[in-house]
Image: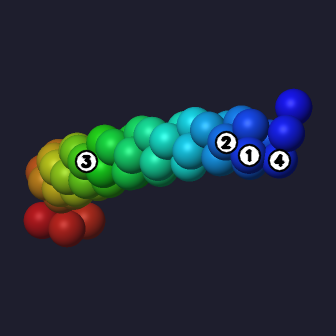
Amino acid sequence: MDDLEEFESWHEDLMAWERFQDELERIKGENAYEDLHDFEDKSVSLQQETSTQSVAERCNNPLNQ
């Protein structure tokens, strides 16, 4: 294999690696976006749950009445 062929081979490998890295970063970005929405959904759910428990506790606790 001469120098040009070796260079072309290395270049092709490097380009394939860069495409792989780009795809990996894209997937990580999508997952981070989905994780953010999951976190927001859980946060809202916990807030609603806490709010509901507070109302129920106030209604059932004779000390607060």
Callout 1–callout 4 Cβ contact below 8 Å: yes
> Distance between the Cα atoms at labels 1 and 2?
6 Å
Residue placed under numbered mark 1 in the picture? 4
Give the percent coordinates (x, y) of residue 58.
Answer: 18, 57
Callout 1–callout 2 Cβ contact below 8 Å: yes
> Distance between the Cα atoms at labels 3 and 1?
50 Å
Q: Residue furthest top?
A: 1
Q: Which comes before the other along the chain, label 3 or label 1?
A: 1
At mark 1, the secondary structure is helix
Residue placed under numbered mark 2 in the picture? 8
Residue type pointed to by label 2: Glu
At mark 4, the secondary structure is helix
Q: Which comes before the other along the chain, label 4 or label 3?
A: 4
At mark 3, the secondary structure is helix
Please name the residue shown 67% across and 42% down the image.
Answer: 8
Residue type pointed to by label 4: Asp
Q: Nearer the viewer, mark 3 or mark 1?
A: 1
> Distance between the Cα atoms at labels 4 and 3?
51 Å
